[in-house]
Amino acid sequence: MRPEIKSKVLVFLVFTGILAGQGAKAQFSNPATGPLSANTVPLAQLMQPTELVKLLKSAGADHPVVFQVGSFVMFQQAHIPNAGFAGPGSQANGSILLKKFSAPLKKGQLIVIYCGCCPWGRCPNIGPAYKELHDLGFTNVKALYLANNFGDDWVSKGYPVERGE
Amino acid sequence: MRILQVIVLLGCAFAFVSLDGIAQGAPNLVHKPAPQFAKPDLNGNLIDLKKYRGKVVLLNFWATWCAPCQVELPRFEAWQGKYGTAGLQVVAVSMDDGDAAVRRTVRRLRLDIPVVMGDATVGNAYGGVLGLPITFLIDRNGIVTEKIKGETNLQQLELRVRALLSR
């Protein structure tokens, strides 16, 4: 092989390798350290399950609007009473639903979002949903802190659930 | 005194496990027949769980957005190749809302194991799949021997699969 062709092939292979590496990196990016990881939600904006249970019982102005921002299959199995399904926060359809359902709300309304599909640091949905609401101008958004998942940290604790749609 | 301590500890452990099951209102499936289902896989082949009677079944609930699931699936695929002739059958149930992302992931991970789309009915039958991954081991008689929630030590799980296969 002629030297100039050899060097072109080498450059092509290196370039292809870099692109493939970037693709693989994107596919396997760690949600715990990704740009919209659940860990990007400020600590002050986290809500513990016990706190939400109390708020759900209240009828006053502090009664929250709750959105589930995870999978619909999980929502159908069990969800927090009166919670709205707003779609997976990490996906485009989730973003669209969250915009739609939050549109009629006042910007100061207490909104609690939750997912619980995976351990907190691995959740791909909470971070994007929190950012979406923040970017829409909502000033009182809390993320329900489910350390392990919705089953372990809510349902197993005997907190109230609804099933179906 | 030591015996008393052991009894108290066992009692606490039993109470914890029992309360967990009661609180969820979900059946504890271990030592019970695996709930049956029949669903088409991504290639349109009917996957009927009862047809795997006589095999050890590793039933894995997963989703494309579940990071630990992406680590487990290639290992389960490898076990299917390694222990398939000894009687292992891996079945993967995706809890995604649609199959497009599932098909992409199956291609990316080069999975040959049957992958079916799960739903709330199957999830509820298995005690509620409300966090992933969840894996069930089912013996050759169709009895659930173990439920594994969350990330697990795959080396130890492989040993338990081998033990089931040798029964």
Image (spheres, coloured by chain):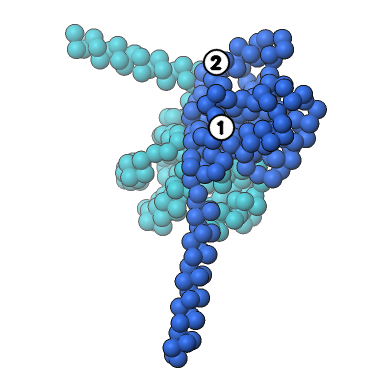
- The local secondary structure at tag 1 comes to loop
Horizontal side, residue B83 vs residue A68: left or right = left
Q: Chain of mark 1?
A: A
Report whether residue A69 is seen: no
Q: Quadrant of the C terminus of chain B?
A: top left
Q: Position of residue B73 (x, y in %)?
A: 47, 49
Q: Residue furthest left?
A: B1
Dot label at residue A41: 1
Q: Amino acid at mark 1?
A: Val
Horizontal side, residue B52 vs residue B5: left or right = right
Quarter-of-image position of residue B105? bottom right
Q: Amino acid at mark 2?
A: Thr
Say which residue appears at 34% left-offset and 13% top-offset.
Answer: B11
Say which residue appears at 48% left-offset and 40% top-offset.
Answer: A32
Q: Nearer the viewer, residue B104 or A22?
A: A22
Q: Position of residue A99 (x, y in %)?
A: 75, 36
Any idea which chain is the cyan one in this picture? B
Say which residue appears at 69% left-offset and 45% top-offset.
Answer: A92
- The local secondary structure at tag 2 comes to helix
Query: Which residue bears the numbered disc 2?
Result: A50
Q: Residue furthest bottom?
A: A2
Q: Nearer the viewer, residue B123 or A34?
A: A34
Quarter-of-image position of residue A108? top right
Any idea which chain is the blue one in this picture? A
Note whether B151 is above or below A144 in the view shown: below
